[in-house]
Amino acid sequence: MRNLVLLDAPSNLGLRPPAPGTVPGCHKLAGALREQRILRRLDAREGGVVVPPRYDRGDWREGDGVFNAAALASYTRKLADRIERHVRAGDFPVVLGGDCSIGLGASLALRRVGRYGLAAVDASPDFRHPGNSDRVGAAGGEEIALATGRGQEDLTDLEGLRPYLRDEDVRFFGIRDYFADDCAELLALRMPVVTVGELRARGPEALADATAQAFAIPELDGFWVHFDADVLDPTVMPAVDSPDPDGLLPDELVALLSPLLASPRCAGLNVTIYDPDLDPEGTAGALLADIVVAALGRA
């Protein structure tokens, strides 16, 4: 069994402020899960913290591109250095975010190593880019578009490695059914999309097994799992920035994640978007920790 290494990536650089004069609280995700004793429960090694730059959008205005771009580029390289080190050592990094823009660090790290796929377990595909939206700005809703080479070069072509992910190596799971009509672009790019309804119809375990097998091809060196807490239904996970209804339930999510994470081809996991500021009693954070522990087979 590979060593699990717990690594904090408490960046909120990719989200819009929840209210004027405030910053997104998801940078507290890692601390909240550590309060749930997740390091001991996972029997993981300590990977420390990759400290992000300060959240400061300055005089950014709509139409200026991605805000915090310079800070995001710097942090992506810094996080990639740490993830790459663990992957090359044969460890299994469990990266606690943070917003979804931390996924760029994982994608860049794996691009340095070889060719890897991505299983994105998320309520939305995070594929906003200048070719399909006039509201580009928050990298937390754009990181997969950026990782596949769409958008400004100071984020899409770090170290001359664009794209970090190939279109055909990306899979989406848990997209809300009412977003399905918005996924035509992804399907045209050969990016499979599995909605909540489709996941229930096909069965999460069977779907995960088939996906792990699909990633086990000679052309790929492995795959990464991105887990956004907003894939859960807001009745159990209200503490996210976009609590859209009709999401997955905890048992369904564990059944999906477990076979993916158990695959010897899986290189690591990141967890994002849970906001402790929206969870004063800590119940959603406790659930999130339970899900991560169960999905990694340590419950």
Image (cartoon, helix red, strand yellow):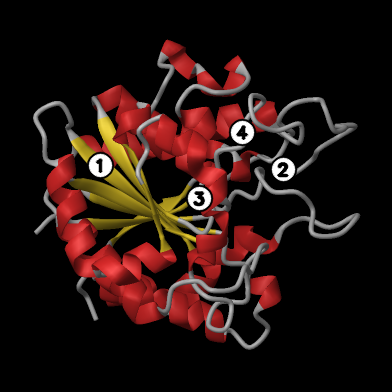
- The amino acid at mark 4 is Leu
Front label number (2 vs 1): 1
Q: Are marks 2 and 1 in contact (CB under 8 Å)?
A: no
Front label number (4 vs 2): 4
Name the residue nearer the viewer: 179 or 128: 179
Q: What element does badge 3 sit on? A: loop
Q: Which mark is residue 54?
A: 2
- The amino acid at mark 1 is Phe
Residue 19, horizontal then vertical, whole percent: 86, 59
**Relative to 106, is 288 above or below?**
below
Q: Which residue is mark 4?
A: 72
State which tag comes first along the sequence, 2 or 3. 3
Q: Which residue is mark 1?
A: 223
Q: Which mark is residue 9?
A: 3
**Residue that lies at the very extreme toward the top in this rendered image:** 160
State which tag comes first along the sequence, 4 or 3. 3
Q: Is residue 290 visible?
A: no
